[in-house]
Amino acid sequence: MAGKPQKNLAYSVLLDFYGPVLTDKQRVILTEYYDEDLSLAEIAENLGITRQGVRDAIKHGEAALDELEQRALKLLHAKTGAALARDVFGADDEIYNAILWHTTGKANMTLLEKVIYLADYIEPSRDFDGVEDLRKVVWEDLDKGLEMGLAMTVEEMEQMGNPVHHNTLQALEYLRGHTHE
C-alpha cells in the first residue's frame, strides 16, 4: 500500500456536480474510480482498454473538472456552505439541501429550497438587468419567479460561454412542465 497514490475524494463531489458535462467515457471511468473504488486494472478490464488509457482518462477528466470548478466559482460557495452547515453546525438534511441547491436549483425543489435560492438571487445588493422585474414576480408567484430566475441564469451562462449546470436545466424544465398546466 505504500506506493499506492491517494485518491482525491473531492473529485467524487465534483463528479456528482459536473459529471453530466464530461464525456461519457470520462464520466464512466471517474465514477468507477472514485465512487465504486475500482482499481485501474479493474476499470481497464471492464472497458477493454489499457491501464495507461484509464490513467490518462482519469487525468483528463480531473483536469476538466478542475477547469469547470474554476469557471463556475459562483457555485463553489454553495457546496462549501452546505458542508459547513452540516459538518460543523449540525444542520439537518433540509437545511443542507437548501444551501447546496441555492445557486443551481434542482427539479422539484422544496419550499425552503425555493426561498433560499430566490432570497440569494434577489437580495437587496443585487443590481443586474431584470432584477427589479424578478423581485416583483417573486412576490406575486414564487414558482413563476423561480422559473424566471432560472431562465435568467441559463441566459447569463450561455452569454458568458460557460456550461449551464445540469440541475439548473432540469429545474427549469421541471417548472415549465408543472407550473403552466
Image: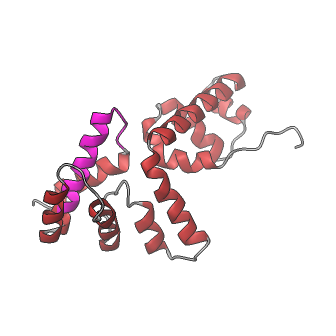
Q: Which residue is located at x 52 percent, y 30 percent? A: 25
- Give the quarter of the image for residue 177: bottom left
Looking at the picture, how far across and down is residue 153, in whole percent? 28, 48
The C terminus, quarter of image = bottom left
As drawn, is 142 to the left or to the right of 125? left
Q: Residue at x 66, y 34 (%)?
A: 43
Could you tell me what secondary structure mostly forms the magenta stretch? Answer: helix
Q: Nearer the viewer, residue 79 or 77?
A: 77
Picture residue at 71% right of the left edge, 33% below the top: 40
Residue occupying the far left of the picture: 181
Is 165 colored magenta in this rendering? no
Quadrant of residue 132 within the rendered picture:
bottom left
Task: Look at the image and tell me in which quarter the N terminus lies.
Answer: top right
x%, y% of residue 112? 34, 73
Where residue 68 sits: x, y (%)?
48, 38
Q: Would residue 158 be visible to someone looking at this image?
A: yes
* Magenta region, residue range: 145-164
- In the image, residue 144 above or below residue 115: above
47 sits left or right of 117 in the view? right
Check the image and tell me how it is coloured: secondary structure
Q: Is residue 118 left or right of residue 162?
A: left
Magenta stretch holds residue 157: yes
Residue 96 location in percent, x, y?
48, 69
